Image (cartoon, grey):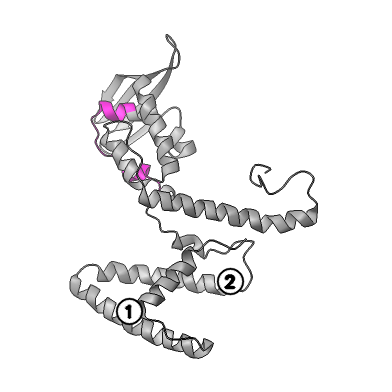
Amino acid sequence: MHSFFNKFITRNNSLIQFVKQYDNCLGSREQAERESDAADFHTVIPCATKSSIEAQFQDVYTHQKFREVQAQFRGKANCITRLTNFALGYSVYEVGEQVFSSIFNKFVVTYDSVAAEVKCQCLLFESRGILCCHALSVLSFERVSQVSPRYILKRWNNKVKEVTHTHIKRSHDEPLLEPRSKRFDQLVFCSQNICKFTSESEELTAILHRAYDNVMVEMESLKAKRKGTSFLSHEDANLESVNELQSPPRI
């Protein structure tokens, strides 16, 4: 708990000071998450090995999670894999992981080539959501070039746009933001379906662009009448929306 409020809360703070600093702490952490997301979008961590499976994780995972995955790929170099049983596409391996010069920890790993499923006795994937070095060693032994999508968890996908969680209701949000968050969620759901449909062809995409331009003109006209502000162009409206979604919270 103390590490969560690091630099904001000390043991000598009063309850009133805690309440005041609470929003500042959450806002600071949100800003750090935004900066981390930006790094995930615009930079790439080099692969530590020549494995195509590592490249598969590199393409989709956030930097933080990919570093954890890379540690397992490096650990694969310390593993010795031996096939102990095989029947109808189902293989059982014994993987020895060298922890000291002459000391090996042994793990049982099973691989189902039909279901493309690998399981290790250490249960690292079940506990932390990443494949262990023992399972990776078996996949390499089996000459598997791509892992099943079941081993790539969506919650660590670097292609999930920040706007999908920008308007999620939080405890430190103002109550007036809740209706807006609901409207935002509804619009995101509808727009995803529309984009999936229209992206199938250039003609449908062009129709959507024309409709979008017309709707933006109508909405900005209404917005200008209500607020008494000047009319915004299509490009200005887009820029204003992006800035509103991505600007850091004021602390």
Residue 23: image x %, image y %? 66, 58
Residue 232 location in percent, x, y? 41, 82
Please indicate whether residue 80 sits to the left or right of residue 39 in the image. Answer: left
The residue most toward the bottom is 225
Give the residue at x 43% y 41%. Answer: 65
The residue furthest front is: 230
Name the element at disc 1: helix
Q: Residue 22 occupies which quadrant of the picture?
A: bottom right
Image spot of residue 158 (x, y percent): 39, 50
Q: Which numbered dot is residue 212?
A: 1
> Which label number is shown at residue 177?
2
Q: Nearer the viewer, residue 246 or 185?
A: 246
Q: Which residues are magenta?
A: 137-154
Is residue 67 shown in magenta?
no
Side (left or right) of 209 relative to 173 = left
Identify whether 242 is placed above or below 95: below
Task: Tell me the kind of residue under disc 2.
Answer: Leu
Q: Secondary structure at mark 2?
A: helix
Quadrant of residue 95 within the rendered picture: top left
- Left or right: residue 85 compared with residue 64: left
